[in-house]
Image: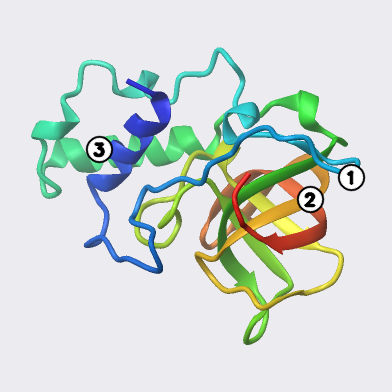
Amino acid sequence: MNPLKIILLLAALCSLAPAQAKDYKVGDRLNETKAATKDAYRTITWDDLMPKDWDPTAPFKGLDLAKLKDSDPRAMEALAKMRKEWSEAPINPELNGKEIRIPGFVVSLDGGPDELREFLLVPYFGACIHVPPPPANQIIHVMPDKPAKGFRSMDTVWVSGVMQVQTSQTTMGNSGYVLMAKKVLPYTGP
C-alpha cells in the first residue's frame, strides 16, 4: 500500500467527522504533474520532500489499525507514537536553497480577511484541520514576500519560491521546510 495512503488511514483513526469544502473530501490530493514552467521554478511533488528510504509506517508494523476503535488505549498509544515520529520526520536536504513550485492546500496561520501573510501548505484536504497534521516532511511553512490576497484555509494554490530546509513549529503542525514564496496563485491543475 502507498505510504501516504497509510498516513491517511492512521490520521483517520482520530479524525473528526469528515467535512467537505468545494469538491474535496478529507484526504483528497491535487494532481501534481511535474510539468515544465515558463519561469525558473522547478515543479516538485510531495514525494520529493521525503527521503526515498523513509517509511512513515515503520513504527506501526504489526498493528492492525483498522480493527482499533478511537477509545482503544492501543489506538491512543499509536496516535501518540505517530505524532512523535512524524514531528521528527526526515527531510530531503537536496531541496535547500532550490527554487521550486508545488501545489497544495492552504492552512492559514496569519492574515486578515482574504489575505495571507503566513500559512502552511499541505498535500491533502483536511490536513491540520480535520485530521492530525501530516509528517513534518509533508508540511511547508510558507512566508510570502507580500500578503497573498483572496485565499483562505483549504483553498488550493500553486506556491513558487526558494525552499529552506528549516524546522518550524506552529499550533497547526510542525514543518520541516520553510518556503520564501515569490508567487501564490490559484491552483488550476498541472
* Residue located at (85% from left, 35% from top): 98
The reply to whether the C-beta atoms of the residues labelled 1 and 3 are less than 8 Å apart is: no
Q: Which residue lies at the image location 82% right of the left edge and 53% below the top edge? A: 180
Give the left or right position of residue 21, taking residue 79 as reference. right
What amino acid is at disc 2?
Ser
Indicate the quadrant where residue 110 lies.
bottom right
Question: Exactly how many numbered labels are in the figure?
Answer: 3
Helix, strand or loop at mark 3: helix
Q: Which residue is mark 1?
A: 39
Q: Residues within 10 Å of mark 3 (few under 14, many from 20)?
A: few
**What label sits on residue 113 in the rendered view?**
none
Q: Residue at x 66, y 78 (%)?
A: 150
Judge by depth and name the residue closer to the eye, 103 or 181: 103
Give the Cα separation between the discs numbered 1 and 2. 10 Å
* Whole-number angstrom distance, CA of label 2 to CA of label 3: 38 Å
* Residue 21 percent across, percent down from the top left: 38, 68
Contact, mark 1 vs mark 2 (Cβ under 8 Å): yes
Please state the horizontal and vertical placement of residue 100, each as a whole percent of the image: 79, 40
Q: Nearer the viewer, mark 1 or mark 2?
A: 1
Label 2 crowd bin: few (<14), some (14–19), many (20+), radius 10 Å: many
The quarter in which the N terminus is drawn is top left
Disc 3: which residue: 77
The residue where tag 2 is placed is: 160
Quadrant of image for the C terminus:
top right
Residue 41 screen position, x and y as percent: 84, 41
Q: Nearer the viewer, residue 13 or 156?
A: 156
